[in-house]
Image (tube, helix red, strand yellow):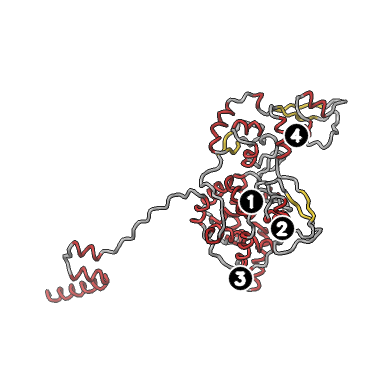
Amino acid sequence: MTRLFLAVLAVLLLGACQALGPVGAEVAQESTPSGDDLLVSAPARKPVEAPLPPPEDLWERLRRELRWHDIHNAHVARARDHFLSQPRYLSVVGERAGNYLFHIVEAVEARDMPAELALLPLVESTLNPYAVSPQRAAGLWQIMPATADYLGMPRDWWYDGRLDVRLATDVALDYLQALHDDFDGDWLLALAAYNAGKGRVAKAVARNERAGRPTDYWSLQLPRETRHYVPRLIALAAIVHYADALGAELPPVPNAPAFVAVPTGGQIELQRAAQLAGVDLRTLRALNPGHLRWASAPGQDELLLPVDRAQRFRTGVAALAPEDRVSWAHYRIEPGDSLVRIARRFDTQVALLREVNDIDGHLIRAGDTLLIPRGSAWPDSLALADAAGPRKPRGYRVRAGDSLYRIASRFNVTVDDLVSWNALDPGQYLQPGQQLRLFPNGR
């Protein structure tokens, strides 16, 4: 019996040694290994890599996160060469990036979306918050009026949410995420749908499915603009990632907030707000392009200000007297009244009465009611009113010998601006007599 028990035990021990593998076998052969033997037989630990410190430059932060820069094909190559052939493009977007790009990068990262999406406003608007396309798409993210209405963005005489840096970014990223989900997690199809419309891309996918062809972005029959659209974004990612190798000079952009939101305590003239903050009006307007008029929009009781000027503005706003804020009077027009007479009576300006009441010319009717703005910075506000909102386009007729580069240089815009404003194909020549739309002061 004892012999049988020992035999069974031997078999079990042999099976256990075989199951453990080589390391277990070594331990079974030497039941009392020394400390040195344990150190030799233990698996080597990989050294723990210390996390990289946050970069000072925002472009470097993006380089660490970009993933699509290695997508190479002829479409991307043409788009990359197109960008690199414009000597002013990177300097223009680099200058504008200081105001907006940090906020966009933060918003993209907070949603765990591809970092490349932070570069989309460079494709859409060259980071110009006042850009308006021939199809009336507007803002950094070039949101169409119908899309804005569908997505619930406020738009009125005072304010256009499509131009608001924070609101437009949130809405655009919400929309892109929804498109991404609709197209089964395919970001390239989502981007194509952002440009061409969800229905058009869905039809192209269905058409390829019926024909037994691939349904990825590169295989679809899409409008010409959309065929260029995604390659441009990927090309920009490559330029940012390989800037040194490509000889691309990107002006440094601080990896830090450019603005902070500060309560206004109510409607306030933008000229007065700029004075309280100690910034020039152009800077205030650049950070708050959604406010279209001479004063902040009713109900929009925050302004974006440079971080280092926020406390000064808070202090100034808290000390404002009621008469220094925007207030309103209602005046019923009497027989014999004129805009000049009413302006004198209320110590205001005719141009401001026209703007606030949407009056063309001088014609007013007795019995109608005028809205009279009461404030203290009206003369300066008139200059602001002329500059507020997206600029009106000017026409330009192409002349013999003109090129996109020559026209862009003449009007201090970029070739990409001209292409975007006029839905041009950069690969085609301009024709003498061709009419172009320009927004030379909208930058």
Question: Label 4 is placed on what type of residue?
Answer: Val
Q: Which residue is mark 2?
A: 404
Residue contact at pointers 1 and 2, CB within 8 angstroms: no
Sequence-wise, the earlier of marks 2 and 3 is 3
Q: Position of residue 350 (x, y in %)?
A: 79, 31
Q: Which residue is mark 3?
A: 214
> 297 or 62: nearer the eye?
62
Above or below: residue 93 compared with residue 5: above
Q: Which residue is mark 4?
A: 356
Residue at mark 1 to residue at mark 3: CA–CA distance = 30 Å
Q: Secondary structure at mark 4?
A: helix
Label disc, if present, on residue 141 of the rendered structure: 1
Would you call the spot at circle 1 few (<14 residues within 10 Å), some (14-19), or many (20 or more)? many
> How many numbered discs, if any?
4
Mark toward the start of the polypeptide (4 vs 1): 1
Number of residues whose C-alpha sits closer than 10 Å to that of mark 2, classed few (under 14), some (14–19) or many (20 or more): some
Based on the displayed image, in which of its 4 quarters is residue 337 positioned?
A: top right
Per the rendering, the mark at residue 282 is none
Q: Is residue 332 above or below residue 428?
A: above
- Amino acid carrying mark 1 in the image: Trp
